[in-house]
């Protein structure tokens, strides 16, 4: 379920050739394992459309077909059993063809996501876009929604996306006040993982903190599984999801006497593998470590040649520096065994 009181849903998109069923299914499963509850696949041609039936049959999550330019591909995708279609009505060749897609979606019981960006604006909105880019996106989306509603189709999700976080925030705020449909959030063409993650977190975080948005995608250049990691962290940071495994680590200073970055990354990797809902602190000095991280479940604080493992803010073990991570997870395992016996 998307919208209403349902939790915010994370989605992503495959980057394999859709007609390569084995590779695409493998990536769909990887995305689902990483936290995606919806997965979108590109449908650039008939071969991809014809592969959708096999993908739908074996996918662990609902699939959305991403279709541009050819409304017949959208209709074919719906016939193959996809749960939804993502279209830009402006590039399908007119309202009549968009209406045919709506009729097919109604027959299939599927959802249409009306996706609007600067490339799919109606011509008469181009001038408005120059002075009010967010307003142009909103006006275009409202028009398309009105068209589908007048045709009797209201099973819609809507997205207004820009590569600008500022425009994305403004457009979605305004759109949320004008339509009743669930909103899909995203910064389109956000960029490479480092910068794209920040741009997405700024825009999506601001909107979600205000209660705007029902589903989201973090669009990054590269492995789409990375998108899920960022999206989950955004939702966890806003307490829209259980916190899950979390590492807190200090930014380092002149007192730091350990290789803190590599230490924190190793703890983070092993904590993710453990999969428990825990907060673990990784601190760079034994002077302030336990005090600064006293609200963590477990932690380590490094010093010159040695460090301290602590639990719930209290030191429990002093060990050599090279054994810090192993001893940390030994303490975690011991506490879990004690809890289970108790």
Image: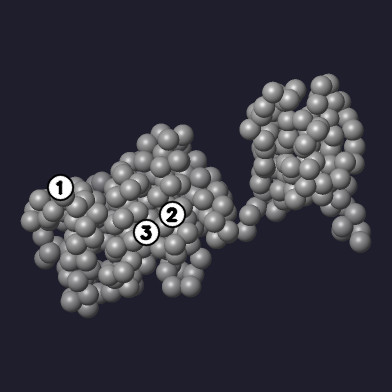
Along the line of sight, the residue nearer the viewer: 302 or 216: 302
Q: Which residue is mark 1?
A: 130
**What colouring does the structure picture have?**
one colour
Q: For the residues marked 3 and 1, what is the alpha-carbon distance in whole angstroms?
A: 24 Å
Numbered label attached to residue 197:
none
To which residue does mark 3 refer? 184
Give the residue drawn at x 31%, y 55%.
170
Observer-nearest residue: 322 or 275? 322
Q: Residue at x 43, y 47 (%)?
A: 202
Q: Quadrant of residue 267?
A: top right
Mark 2 lies on a secondary structure that is helix
Q: Which image quadrant: the C terminus?
A: bottom right
Is the residue marked by circle 1 packed among few (<14), some (14-19), or many (20+) residues within 10 Å?
Answer: few
Q: Name the element at disc 3.
A: strand
Whichever of callouts 2 and 3 sits on the residue coming sooner in the sequence is 3
239, above or below 21, in the image = below
Q: Are marks 2 and 1 in contact (CB under 8 Å)?
A: no
């Amino acid at each position: 379920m998307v919208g209403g009181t349902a939790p915010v849903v994370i989605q992503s998109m495959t980057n394999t050739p859709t007609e390569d069923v084995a590779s695409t299914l493998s990536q769909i499963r990887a995305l689902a394992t990483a936290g995606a509850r919806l997965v979108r696949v590109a449908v650039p041609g008939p071969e991809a459309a014809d592969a959708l039936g096999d993908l739908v049959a074996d996918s662990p999550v609902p699939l959305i077909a991403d279709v541009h330019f050819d409304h017949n591909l959208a209709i074919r995708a719906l016939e193959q059993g996809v749960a939804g279609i993502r279209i830009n009505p402006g590039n399908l060749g007119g309202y009549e063809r968009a209406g045919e897609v709506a009729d097919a979606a109604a027959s299939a019981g599927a959802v249409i996501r009306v996706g609007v960006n600067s490339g799919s604006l109606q011509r008469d909105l181009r001038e408005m876009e120059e002075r009010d880019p967010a307003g142009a996106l909103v006006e275009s989306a409202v028009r398309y929604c009105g068209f589908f509603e007048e045709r009797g189709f209201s099973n819609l999700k809507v997205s207004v996306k820009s590569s600008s976080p500022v425009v994305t925030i403004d457009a979605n705020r305004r759109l949320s006040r004008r339509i009743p449909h669930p909103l899909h959030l995203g910064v389109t063409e956000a960029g490479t993982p480092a910068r794209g993650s920040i741009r997405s977190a700024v825009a999506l975080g601001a909107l979600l903190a205000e209660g705007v948005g029902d589903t989201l995608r973090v669009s990054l250049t590269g492995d789409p599984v990375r998108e899920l990691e960022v999206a989950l962290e955004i939702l966890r940071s806003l307490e829209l999801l259980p916190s899950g495994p979390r590492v807190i680590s200090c930014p380092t200073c002149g007192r730091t006497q350990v290789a803190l970055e590599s230490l924190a990354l190793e703890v983070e990797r092993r904590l993710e593998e453990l999969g428990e809902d825990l907060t673990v602190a990784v601190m760079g000095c034994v002077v302030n470590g336990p005090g600064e991280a006293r609200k963590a479940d477990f932690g380590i604080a490094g010093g010159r040649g040695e460090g301290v493992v602590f639990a719930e803010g209290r030191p429990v073990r002093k060990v050599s520096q090279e054994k810090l991570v192993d001893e940390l997870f030994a303490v975690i395992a011991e506490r879990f065994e004690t809890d289970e016996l108790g």
